[in-house]
Amino acid sequence: TAHALQLLQSTFRVPVIGVLEPGVEATLADPACQRVGIIGTEGTIRSSAYQYSLAMRRPDLRIHAAATPLLVPFIEEGWTEHPALKAVLRDYLKPLLDKGVDTLVLACTHYPLLIPVLKKMLGGKIRLVDSASTCAAHVRSLLDSHDLRRAAKSKPSLEIYLTDLSEKAEVMVRRFLGDDAGKVKKAVL
């Protein structure tokens, strides 16, 4: 979480990348951005980390945040097209839309799975900023700038370790990563 990032960055000698800063940079990359809506978990919104970071760089920006705690359970159940999810999304987004947001920051790594339904609901009128994808692009850029990206001589492999290895957890991994999810194993601590 955003709370632990500074501690981790000061503790380890390797770069520790958070999702917040790349998401903020992507949000501010569009000079037409004037009114930003942020949706995230209760903890993320309560921390005000996104709000603070945006306001420090652009004091003129109008920032509106909404905790959206019911979205993660819907996503984890695979109900990203379910009518109940759409009703909940409408309720969560209405106050932000009423404030005229032109950009919506998805401040949770689960929320990229909502992009298709959000695009349908918003009709392309509001720019979506996916903090997870912007973080991945930032990591790729960092690897490139330090010449650390490995040449694809062989197919890369991925091993995922989870402390809670259940059938549901494995389904979630596949939902997020698709067929390239690799091996999912139990982490023994």
Image (cartoon, rainbow, N blue to C red):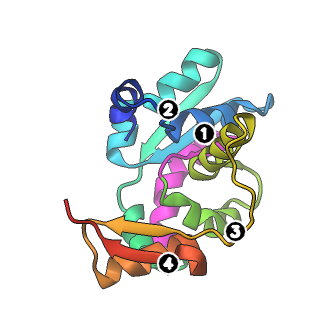
Residue 85: where, in percent of width, then height?
47, 72
Please report whichever mark, 1 or 4, sits nearer to the chain's N-terminal start. Answer: 1
Q: Nearer the viewer, mark 3 or mark 1?
A: 1
At label 3, which amino acid type do we have?
Lys
Q: Nearer the viewer, mark 1 or mark 2?
A: 1
Q: Pointer 1: residues within 10 angstroms few (<14), some, or many (20+)?
A: many
| Alpha carbon separation for disc pair 4 and 2 | 29 Å
Name the residue carrying label 3: 120
Is residue 148 part of the magenta span, yes or no?
Answer: no
Mark 3 or mark 2, earlier in chain:
2
The answer to whether mark 1 and mark 2 are in CB contact below 8 A is: yes
| x and y percentages locating residue 64 in the rendered image | 52, 35
User: Pointer 2: what residue?
Assistant: 50
As rendered, which of 99 and 117 lies closer to the eye? 117
> Which residue is label 4 attached to?
174
Q: Residues within 10 Å of mark 2 (few under 14, many from 20)?
A: many
Query: What is the x, y in percent for residue 7?
Result: 33, 27
In the image, the segment drawn in magenta is: 85-108
Front-lying residue, 54 or 84? 54
